[in-house]
Image (cartoon, rainbow, N blue to C red):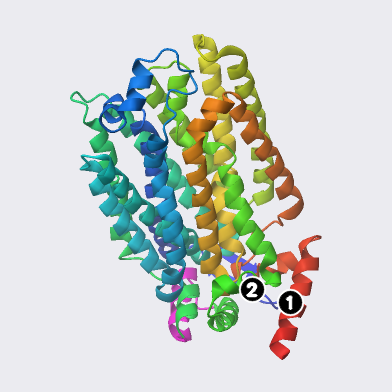
Amino acid sequence: MAVGLAFTSEGGGQYYSGKMTPFVVLSCIVAATGGLIFGYDLGISGGVTSMEPFLKKFFPEVYRKMKEDTNISNYCKFDSQLLTTFTSSLYIAGLIASLFASSVTRAFGRKASILVGGTAFLAGSALGGAAFNIYMLIFGRVLLGVGIGFANQSVPLYLSEMAPPKNRGAFNIGFQVCVAIGVLSANLLNYGTQKIKGGWGWRISLAMAAAPASILTIGALFLPETPNSIIQRSNDHQKAERMLQRVRGTADVQAELDDLIRAGSISKTINHPFKKIIERKYRPQLVMAILIPFFQQVTGINVISFYAPVLFRTIKLSESTSLLMSAIVTGGVGTISTILSMILADRLGRKVLFLVGGIQMLVSQVMIGSIMAAQLGDHGGFSSGYAYLILVLVCVYTTGFAYSWGPLGWLVPSEIFPLEIRSAGQSITVAVGLLFTFLVAQTFLAMLCHFKAGIFFFFGGWVAFMTTFVHFFLPETKNLPIEQMDKLWAEHWFWRRIVGEGVEDSKMQEAL
C-alpha cells in the first residue's frame, strides 16, 4: 500500500511529493544485499580461523600452540601475524579498491560499482574455497576485499539517494540489516561445517561466499540508476525526471528535480572532487567522513565480529560451543537489534541512538573487562557461571552496537555530502573504515596477548570519547532532504563559524 509523504524543499513553501512505491522498495532491497557479502565475510573469517583442520593446514604453529603448549597465556595462544594477515588482507585491498570505486561511481553510476563489487567477490569466493596453499588463500581474500571496497562505497550512496527523505534512515539501515544477516548465516554455516568429518568443512564455508555474491551480482543487472546519478553524469533532465516520477510514484516531482539539477550543475564544475573536499566549506563533512568510520572500528566490535569464536575458546568453551555462541550472539542478536534501529532512526533521530548505544556499550565493556581480569588470569579458567555471564554481557554490548554505531556509522556519512563531492566523501568513509578495520584486525590478537583483559577498557575509553563527540559536534540529520544537508552545518553552534568563512573564501576565489 502506498504511503503519501511531503517534504519541505529549499524555498520553504514548496514540498517534495511522493509515495512509498513498490519500485523503490524492491530496488533498495536488491541493492542492500551488498551488505550480505560484507557480513558473510565478517562472520566466516572468525569461525574458520578457529577451526582446527584449517589451522593445522595453513597455520600449523598456531595449531601447535593451541594444542600442545600449556605454558602460553590464555590470551596469547592465537597470536600469529600470519593468521591475522589472512583476515586483514581483505581490508587493505578493500581500502585501495574503494578509492578507485569513487571514480567508477561518479563516472559510470552507482549501479556499475555495485556490479563490479559483486563480480570481484564472486571470484574471490571461488579461489578461497579451492585454496591449497597460503598464497592462494590470501589472494582470494584480496579479491574479496576488492568486492567489499566497491560494494561498501556504492550501496549506501544508492540507498540514501533512492529513499524518500522521511524514511531514508530505515532504507539505508537495510544495508546493515543485510550485514547482520550475513554474519548470522556465516556463523551458522561454520557451526555446521566444523562438524564435517575429514576436516574439509572450512572449504564449504569459504566457497559459500559465492551465494551472497551471486545474489548481488545478478540483482545489480536489473537495478535502475538513481536520479541523482543520472543528473550528475548527463544533461538528460527528462530521463532523470521520468526516473524520479517512477521512484516517487507521482508526476509532481518538480521541487525535488530542481534541487537535483542545482546540485548537478555544481557537481559538473568539479573535476577533482578529492581536492575539492579539503576546502574549508566542506570541513564538517570531511571531519565526519574520517571520524565516524574510525570511531565505528574502535568501539571494539571487532573483538566480537572477527574473533568471537576465538574469544569464547579463550574462556574455555569448546570449539563447537564457541561457534554456536558466536552465531547466536553476533548474528541473531545483531540482526534483531539492527531491525530495531530501522524502526527508530527516523523517529527518535540518529543522535539519540548514538548516545544511548554508546552508554550501553561502555557499561558492558567495563563489566566484561572487570570479570575477565578478576577471574580468568593467564592459565586459569572460568566457572560455567562466569562464562555464561560474559556471554550475556557480550549480548548486551552487541545489541548496543547493532542499533547505534553499526548502522548509523554507514547511514550518517552517506547522507551528509553534497552531490559534487558525494562519491569522494563516501570513498573516504569506506577507506578510513577499512584502514582501521585492517589495523584492528592485524593488531587485535597481539593486543589481546599484551593487554589481556585491559583490552576491553582500552576500547571502552574510545566509546566514552566518541559518545561525547557526537553529543556536541554532530547535528541531527533525520527527515532532511539529502540535497539540503548543507543547511545543518550553517546553523550548528560550532561548524557555522568554519562553514561561513569557507563559503566567503570560495566566493572571493570565484570572483577573482
Mark sitting earlier along the chain (2/1): 2
Instruction: Please check the rendered image and state whether residue 379 is part of the magenta-colored stretch, yes or no.
Output: no
Quarter placement of the C terminus: bottom right
Q: Which residue is mark 2?
A: 15
In the rendered image, which quarter is residue 4 located in? bottom right
* Callout 1 amino acid: Val
Residue at disc 1, secondary structure:
helix
Q: Which residue is mark 1?
A: 503
Image vertical order of residue 84 relative to residue 8, above or below: above
Image vertical order of residue 179 relative to residue 332, above or below: below
Front-most of residues 149 and 77? 77
Q: CA distance from mark 2 to mark 1?
A: 27 Å
Front-most of residues 310 and 484? 310
Front-most of residues 334 and 420? 420
In the rendered image, which quarter is residue 394 located in? top right
Residue stretch rendered in magenta on the structure? 235-252
